[in-house]
Amino acid sequence: MEIRNNLIDRIAEAEGEGWLGEIEGLRISLAGAESKIRQIDTKSPGRPVNLGLPARRKER
């Protein structure tokens, strides 16, 4: 939730400063964060949530 709240604060700052490109990028990030929060909220306790992290490479 802290990341979500930080993004909301940054969007408000960007809107106040007129940083249109920054606003769009932050809104995309916020949508992704909210999607992950919904996934976590709807999963059964103890079940993993895919965070979209890359797979580890096998060492030779």
Image (tube, rainbow, N blue to C red):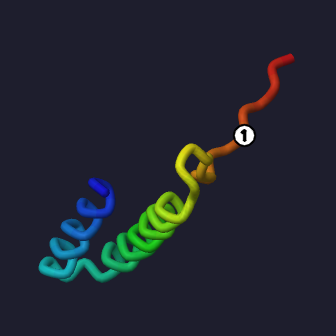
Task: From this view, report whether residue 37 is shown above or below residue 11.
Answer: above
Given the image, on which type of amino acid does mark 1 rest?
Answer: Ala
Residue shown at 13%/80% (left/top)?
16
Residue nearer the viewer, 37 or 7: 37
Q: Quadrant of the N terminus?
A: bottom left
Q: Residues within 10 Å of mark 1 (few under 14, many from 20)?
A: few
Residue 13 as seen in the image, left or right of residue 4: left
Residue 9, horizontal then vertical, whole percent: 19, 67
Residue 38, horizontal then vertical, whole percent: 48, 67
Residue 57, horizontal then vertical, whole percent: 77, 31
Residue at the extreme right of the image, as rendered: 60
Residue nearer the viewer, 36 or 26: 36
Residue 35 as seen in the image, left or right of residue 59: left
Mark 1 element type:
loop
Residue shown at 58%/52% (left/top)?
51
Residue shown at 14%/77% (left/top)?
17
Residue 9 as seen in the image, left or right of residue 24: left
Q: Quadrant of the C terminus?
A: top right
Residue shown at 81%/26% (left/top)?
58
The quadrant in which residue 39 appears is bottom right
Residue at the extreme front of the image, as rendered: 45
Residue at the extreme left of the image, as rendered: 16
Residue nearer the viewer, 19 or 29: 29
Q: How many marks?
A: 1
Task: From this view, report whether residue 32 is shown above or below residue 46.
Answer: below
Residue 26 as seen in the image, left or right of residue 56: left
- Mark 1, residue position: 55
Residue 35, horizontal then vertical, whole percent: 50, 69
